[in-house]
């Protein structure tokens, strides 16, 4: 079995056979024709446009009754195809430069697509995909190739592709598509939007998917965790079949809790945060009170160079806009150790998780760190942004990080650049040494958030990447709940906000225990919101406190899980 | 040459459907029609008959724009497009 990872954009689980879909790939080279043939080649272009319009109109006709919404995509394609500026541009290239029609079409459409992609509004930027789609249609017709699409699948499959264009997804024979995974695409891409509206599980951004997977391979698509399991074993298949049944049941029950106020049965309000790792807008923002964890690694890892201050600033501003006025907690670069950057040489370490990573790495690279801090500070002028440092172990770390912020602030002040002078500075609590002195830390930071995955790893001395010791990774152990109780109590006593943004916050059982331990801010992946809201709504504050007390006194993780699960099951 | 200034009043700005309707209406006229955003000094007048150019302007609610036309039916073109914007494209 092999596991591929990607970005789950449409939730769900699917089991089935892979179907590799290769769309027409335009192979265009810069080329010109001899003088005197201008009319001939322009006519060729006009004929292609005419055929393209006919194709589009027949798609529109076949769709307008059953799915008028999707037909609109193709109406928009006709608009683009007949756009005055496009026609002018192509005509000019053919007549003035004697450019071959295919190259002219490619140049004009690509130019406009790049222009739209730069738009601030992600909805406009997404229209670039429509332009590329129309371009491919015209290029294919110019080449004399037939239309190929997913409209006629014989059996149920999981579609694997480099990318799906709007015309692929819209004409797709969705009765037979169990799931989709592609190599590129974000949460606002057409593929993502259509997959969600069809309720087809989809994972995008699976690197080299079409190279690794072959037609007919047995595949499990876990679009809850963002994993593709290739050629799974029998037990895994059985496990996922059960998961699928459970998932469908869960969905039905928790969906209705999504837009409810986060309240426990006795009326106390808590808040729900969202964990994000990109700039895509998402409807989940409206179910959350804040962004508890904005990971910034994607800017560094999806790039071939260190992201510039401007690139980072633009991304941070976009996230603030997505959050619609709610606070956004930006975590500075959490890299080093196992996560490396291909454009930077990083020495190999024997114990990467105990090594030069996250804040340590940033303090070690002050210029790189300053670029991110300046970008974050500048963005803070546009909305409630707060900065959070990962991998803090001592008061020295807090002071060094604050000093770096102060330096960046002083620079901006000198340059007369606007930022929020009172920006909140906080830390991740994931190393036991800082958890033990949470009272001291609370005096020098504005807030903190617990990263429960790393806290478990460091508290239990378990490398969470090592598959041989997964049973030792016990994030719901009595030790964990004792240390968490202590952290919450110290921060609550100091009157400083404390949240949890690790996996535990999104686990409804642990969330209940942590509520009982005094936690009021839970930040999680969008997928867990409904379930956490539902479980917490079943208990009063007093009941949650009793459960937490009991959980802390049980001897093993297994006992705690069994106990809390039983309490929850009794209510639901 | 004839022109009028207005602020976009519909919540979704000049994207998607409103943009299409705006361009479709502009195309009904013989004259040259342009839209220019007034809150950005670098902005150039964009061809109102090109959906791509209009989208690329990124015109959202509250953006002040100038609709200008040049040609035989310029007054009617500007007045009708102005009325379309004024009516918020039927949104509300």
Image (spheres, helix red, strand yellow):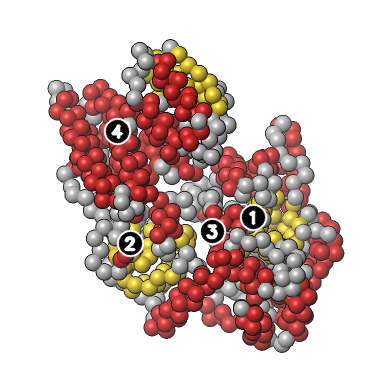
* Circle 4 SS class: loop
Q: Which residue is mark 4?
A: A82
Q: Are marks 1 and 4 on the same chain?
A: yes
Upstream in the sequence, badge 4 or badge 3? 4
Q: Are marks 2 and 1 on the same chain?
A: yes
Q: Which residue is mark 2?
A: A174
| Residue A161 located left or right of residue B8 | left
| Residue A39 located left or right of residue A251 | left
| Residue A306 located left or right of residue A447 | left
- Residue A316: in sight, yes or no? no
Circle 4 chain:
A
Q: Which residue is mark 1?
A: A291
Which mark's residue is nearer the viewer, 2 or 1?
A: 2
The crowd level at tag 3 (other Cα within 10 Å; few <14, some 14-19, many 20+) is: some
How many angstroms separate mark 4 from mark 2 (CA)? 29 Å
Circle 1 chain:
A
Q: Are marks 3 and 1 on the same chain?
A: yes
Location of residue A331 (image quadrant): bottom right
């Amino acid at each position: 079995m092999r596991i591929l990872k990607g970005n789950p954009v449409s939730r769900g689980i699917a089991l089935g056979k892979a179907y590799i879909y290769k769309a027409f790939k335009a192979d265009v080279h810069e080329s010109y024709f001899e003088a005197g043939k201008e009319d001939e080649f322009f006519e060729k272009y006009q004929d292609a446009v005419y055929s393209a319009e006919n194709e589009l109109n027949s798609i529109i006709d076949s769709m307008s009754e059953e799915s008028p919404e999707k037909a609109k995509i193709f109406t928009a394609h006709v608009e683009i195809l007949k756009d005055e500026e496009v026609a002018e541009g192509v005509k000019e290239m053919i007549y003035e430069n004697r450019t071959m029609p295919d190259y002219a079409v490619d140049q004009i459409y690509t130019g406009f697509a790049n222009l739209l992609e730069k738009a601030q509004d992600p909805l406009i930027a997404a229209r670039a995909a429509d332009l590329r789609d129309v371009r491919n249609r015209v290029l294919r017709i110019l080449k004399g190739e037939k239309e190929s699409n997913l409209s006629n699948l014989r059996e149920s499959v999981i579609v694997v592709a480099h990318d799906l264009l709007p015309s692929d997804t819209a004409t797709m024979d969705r009765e037979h598509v169990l799931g989709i995974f592609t190599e590129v695409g974000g949460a606002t891409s057409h593929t993502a939007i259509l997959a969600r509206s069809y309720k087809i599980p989809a994972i995008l951004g699976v690197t080299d998917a079409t190279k690794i997977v072959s037609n007919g391979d047995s595949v499990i698509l876990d679009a809850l965790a963002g994993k593709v399991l290739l050629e799974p074993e029998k037990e895994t298949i059985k496990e996922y079949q059960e998961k699928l049944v459970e998932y469908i049941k869960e969905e039905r029950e928790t969906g209705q809790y999504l837009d409810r106020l986060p309240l426990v049965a006795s009326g106390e309000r808590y808040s729900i945060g969202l964990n994000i790792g990109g700039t895509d807008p998402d409807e989940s923002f409206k179910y959350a009170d804040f962004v508890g964890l904005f990971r910034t690694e994607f800017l560094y890892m999806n790039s071939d160079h260190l992201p510039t201050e401007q690139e980072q600033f633009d991304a941070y501003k976009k996230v603030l806009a997505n959050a619609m006025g709610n606070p956004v907690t930006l975590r500075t670069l959490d890299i080093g150790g196992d996560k490396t950057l291909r454009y930077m040489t990083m020495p190999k370490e024997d114990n990467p998780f105990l090594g030069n990573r996250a804040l340590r790495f940033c303090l070690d690279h002050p210029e790189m760190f300053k670029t991110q801090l300046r970008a974050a500070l500048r963005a803070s002028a546009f909305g409630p942004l707060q900065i959070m440092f990962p991998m803090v172990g001592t008061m020295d770390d807090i002071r060094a990080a604050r000093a770096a912020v102060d330096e960046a602030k002083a620079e901006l002040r000198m340059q007369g650049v606007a930022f929020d002078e009172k920006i909140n500075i906080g830390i991740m609590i994931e190393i036991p040494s800082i958890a033990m002195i949470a009272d001291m830390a609370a005096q020098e930071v504005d807030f903190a958030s617990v990263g429960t995955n790393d806290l478990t790893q460091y508290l239990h001395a378990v490398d969470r990447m090592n598959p041989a010791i997964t049973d030792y990774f016990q994030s719901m152990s009595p030790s964990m709940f004792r240390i968490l109780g202590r952290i919450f109590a110290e921060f609550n006593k100091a009157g400083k906000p404390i949240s949890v943004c690790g996996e535990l916050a999104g686990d409804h059982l642990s969330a209940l225990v942590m509520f009982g331990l005094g936690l009021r801010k839970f930040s999680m992946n969008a997928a867990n919101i409904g379930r956490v809201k539902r479980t917490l709504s079943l208990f009063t504050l007093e009941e949650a406190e009793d459960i937490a007390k009991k959980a802390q006194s049980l001897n093993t993780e297994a006992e705690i899980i069994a106990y809390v699960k039983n309490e929850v099951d009794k209510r639901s | 040459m004839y022109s009028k200034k207005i602020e976009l009043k519909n919540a979704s700005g000049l994207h998607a459907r409103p943009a299409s309707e705006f361009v479709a209406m502009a195309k009904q006229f013989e004259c040259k029609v342009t839209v220019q955003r007034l809150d950005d000094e670098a902005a150039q007048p964009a061809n109102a008959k090109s959906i791509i150019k209009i989208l690329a302007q990124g015109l959202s609610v509250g953006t002040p724009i100038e609709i200008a036309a040049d040609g035989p039916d310029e007054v009617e073109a500007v007045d009708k497009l102005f009325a379309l914007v004024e009516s918020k494209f039927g949104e509300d």
